[in-house]
Amino acid sequence: MIRHTVVFRLKHPEGSDAELAFMEAARVLAAIPGVQAFEQLRQVSPKNDFRFGFSMEFADADAYRAYDLHPDHVAFVRERWLPEVEAFMEIDYAPL
Amino acid sequence: MIRHTVVFRLKHPEGSDAELAFMEAARVLAAIPGVQAFEQLRQVSPKNDFRFGFSMEFADADAYRAYDLHPDHVAFVRERWLPEVEAFMEIDYAPL
């Protein structure tokens, strides 16, 4: 199992319609084959400057790679992620 | 629900006995009242320099605060975390 997470901050004002529209658009990721346990989360620690997170799990590295190359993921990154995200960090976990 | 996560890198060489001993010592955290879904994880993304992660969940902010103040947590931070961890970042999630 690989848990892919990304913590991020949007360019949009907090609570804006644009913020909501971004999160709604991101739900397309949950439907990509191989994606399990998809979560949209609020980042609540005052110890970093990120505001949201996505978390999803893959059975193995092949499933993760297929997601990464999937046209719906590629389109989301190009059309929404790159223009609307101000800062982000990817953290991926596997069982110890 | 609050999911408290910390991603980190140890001062110890990878695969060393000291690394293993640190991870074993950290299991004390799982037994602190209020801690749910405790996980020790390997960080596997090449896009950051951290190597491990802990993840745990709390029912609410009060349970999280009680953990933070619990003597076993305070002792672990003083005796193991501060001397043995080279770098870390805390990320906490709540449902959107």
Image (cartoon, coloured by chain):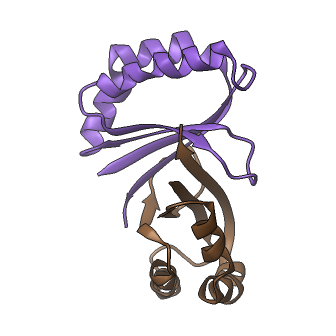
Chain colours: A purple, B brown
- Residue drawn at x 39%, y 48% is A3
Residue B64: where, in percent of width, then height? 60, 67
Residue B82: where, in percent of width, then height? 72, 79
Nearer to me, B46 or A92: A92
Residue B38 seen in the current view: no
Nearer to me, B40 or B85: B40
Residue B89 seen in the current view: yes
Does residue B34 sit above or below A55 in this rendering? below
- Residue drawn at x 75%, y 52% is A46
Q: Is residue A18 left or right of residue B29?
A: right
Q: Is residue A26 left or right of residue A34?
A: right
Residue B22: where, in percent of width, then height? 53, 83
Q: Is residue B69 left or right of residue B44?
A: right
Q: Quadrant of residue B12?
A: bottom right
Does residue B3 sit above or below A22 in this rendering? below
- Residue drawn at x 66%, y 89% is B75
Nearer to me, A29 or A69: A29
Q: Quadrant of residue A34?
A: top left
- Residue drawn at x 65%, y 58% is B90
Residue A33: where, in percent of width, then height? 24, 27
